[in-house]
Amino acid sequence: MRINCISTGSSGNLYELLDSKGNSIILEAGEPRHTYMKHREATTAPEMVIISHSHGDHSFYANQYEMMCTVHRWKQRAESDNFKAFGFEVVHGDVLNYAYLIKFLEDDRFLFFATDLEYEEKSLQPIFKALKFHKVENFLIECNYNDYLYHLAEKEQRIGCDRHFSDNDLIRFIKKVGAKEPKIITIHGSERLSGDAYTKKMIKGRIPNATVAVSVGAKNGVKNLFKL
Ligand SMILES: [Zn+2]
């Protein structure tokens, strides 16, 4: 599978997923359609768009994508010809938000996608169970801030952090899931409270078998593309 992180973070989220045959879907619609058209990898139309929750950095441009394909707005189930997604409700302030286990039908592989979530044990239990059951090893998952920067930060810089995963939350999560050699792409890093190199080192240090990449989105015409 290929994961094209076109844009990530609080200014806008847009991810393109492709299977081995080049079939694709889009996650989130926090950037306009022309941004997708400019950076996309697929040569055919996307099969669907899945949007996790209503915050603008994930959903603002949803209408623009309706001209191309079906757009699923915070739905528990989303299905297309070659992809199947099941949503788990996760805690993110008081907004309805889903994390998705996505099956690439053609390749018979799974990707777990989660962003904008709190480490709230009860809501995560069904996820731990499902990911263990399916032996999920691929993660496109939020790492919003580093706890050490959070502790150094001023009170106003910390606003909103409690609704997101920190590096330690992510590490705890991956350990609970029991992935043997997890492939982790972190998303939605905060500009103020996360350092890309530190994040990578921190996760690698705590989960030695992991392969870790920190996504930054397409920058200066260079794609932010990952192959898992
Ligand atoms: Zn949000």
Image (spheres, rainbow, N blue to C red):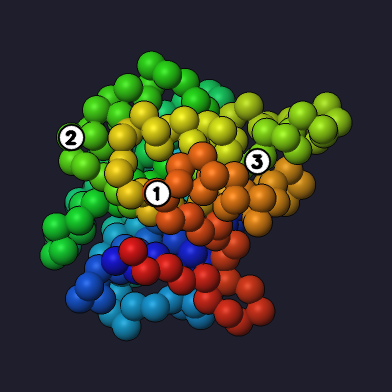
Say which residue label 2 marks. 133
Tell me whether circle 2 and circle 1 mark residues in contact (CB < 8 Å): no
Q: Residues within 10 Å of mark 1 (few under 14, many from 20)?
A: few
Q: In front: mark 2 or mark 1?
A: 1
Q: In front: mark 3 or mark 1?
A: 1
Q: Residues within 10 Å of mark 3 (few under 14, many from 20)?
A: many
Say which residue label 1 marks. 209
Q: What residue is rendered at 49% in x and 36% in y?
A: 171
Residue 145 is tagged as 3
Can you say whether 168 is above or below 113 in the image?
above
Element type at mark 2? helix
Disc 2/disc 3 C-alpha distance (Å): 29 Å
Work out which quarter of the rendered image holds the N terminus and state it.
bottom left
Q: In the rendering, at what x and y percent does residue 48 appear?
A: 29, 60
Indicate left or right for 146 with 46 as reference.
Answer: right
Element type at mark 3? loop
Whichever of labels 2 and 3 marks the residue nearer the N terminus, that label is: 2
Can you say whether 188 is above or below 215 in the image?
above
Whichever of labels 2 and 1 marks the residue nearer the N terminus, that label is: 2
Q: Which is more toward the observer, 73 or 20?
A: 20
Indicate left or right for 79 with 140 as reference.
Answer: left
